[in-house]
Image (spheres, rainbow, N blue to C red):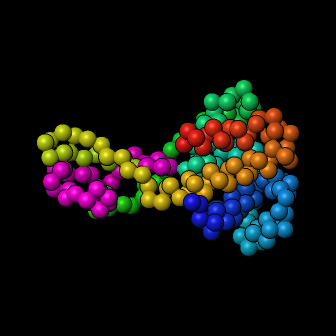
């Protein structure tokens, strides 16, 4: 079950990031204006509205909000007929170029799988060679000499994704009532399909 405190924390983050990238007009259309105003006062945001065009700001919002939002942006690039060409171009820049988390991979595997690394691996590279929004990938050599890769999910990623998906559903439903463009795009259906895929 989704932790309400986690959902509230992510709601604040989303409001703060939208304001940071100049989407105050969008926030002003939402039904909880007083709560939003209070969050923005607490965050003391500086708007980056004039630094980029609207489509690049949408991309930057998704990048800053993390894994689920990046994946949603990537999925949206397949809907070229529904989105402006300039937006699709920006969303295609969304790649999983995420800074790797420092993880003791050997300790993690021993703990998660209840194994001794020496019984299964000659060696595991301590630094990942690839890092994405949901997982990291490491090079390793099995005890029989075979080279393999180990892909692990980032810690707490499930909780973050659940909170973000719940918020995406809430936001898409609200936006569909406040924007004809969003209603025509059928954003709630896109988010529902995306949630099932993710």
Look at 73% across and 60% down and name the residue there: 15
User: Which percent across, then down, holds residue 39?
Assistant: 75, 69
In the drawing, does residue 97 fall left or right of residue 37?
left
Question: Is residue 23 located in the magenta-colored stretch of the structure?
Answer: no
User: How many labels were placed on the picture?
Assistant: 0
Residue 38 sits in quarter:
bottom right
Viewer-proximal residue, 38 or 190?
A: 190
Instruction: Decide if residue 64 is in sight here.
Output: no
Viewer-proximal residue, 168 or 21?
A: 168
User: Which percent across, then down, holds residue 134?
Assistant: 48, 49
Instruction: Decide if residue 168 is in sight here.
Output: yes
In the drawing, does residue 117 fall left or right of residue 54?
left
**What residue occupies the far top of the structure in this picture?**
81
Location of residue 186 with respect to 140 vertically, above or below: above
Look at 78% across and 53% down and name the residue there: 23
User: Which percent across, then down, holds residue 102?
Assistant: 39, 61
Look at 81% across and 34% down and name the residue there: 184
Location of residue 17 with respect to 192 vertically, above or below: below
Q: Which residues are magenta?
A: 108-135
Quadrant location of the N terminus? bottom right
**What residue occupies the far bottom of the structure in this picture?**
42
In the drawing, does residue 165 fall left or right of residue 135?
right
In the drawing, does residue 166 fall left or right of residue 172?
left
**What residue occupies the far front of the structure in this picture?**
1
Question: Is residue 134 located in the magenta-colored stretch of the structure?
Answer: yes
Look at 73% across and 40% down and name the residue there: 187
Quadrant location of the C terminus? top right
User: Which percent across, then down, holds residue 113?
Assistant: 28, 56
């Amino acid at each position: 079950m989704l932790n309400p405190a986690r959902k509230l924390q992510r709601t604040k983050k989303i409001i703060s990031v939208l304001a940071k990238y100049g989407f105050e007009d969008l926030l002003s259309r939402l039904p909880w204006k007083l709560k939003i105003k209070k969050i923005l006062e607490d965050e003391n945001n500086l708007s980056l509205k004039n630094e980029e065009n609207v489509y690049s700001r949408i991309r930057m919002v998704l990048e800053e909000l993390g894994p689920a939002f990046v994946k949603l942006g990537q999925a949206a690039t397949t809907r070229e007929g529904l989105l402006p060409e300039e937006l699709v171009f920006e969303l295609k820049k969304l790649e999983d170029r995420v800074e790797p988390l420092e993880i003791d991979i050997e300790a993690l595997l021993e703990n998660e799988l209840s194994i001794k690394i020496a019984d299964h691996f000659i060696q595991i590279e301590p630094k990942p060679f690839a890092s994405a929004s949901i997982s990291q990938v490491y090079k390793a050599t099995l005890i029989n000499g075979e080279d393999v890769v180990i892909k692990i999910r980032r810690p707490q990623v499930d909780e973050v994704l659940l909170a973000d998906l719940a918020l995406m559903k809430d936001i898409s439903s609200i936006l569909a009532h406040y924007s004809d463009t969003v209603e025509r795009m059928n954003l709630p259906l896109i988010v529902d399909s995306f949630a099932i895929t993710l």
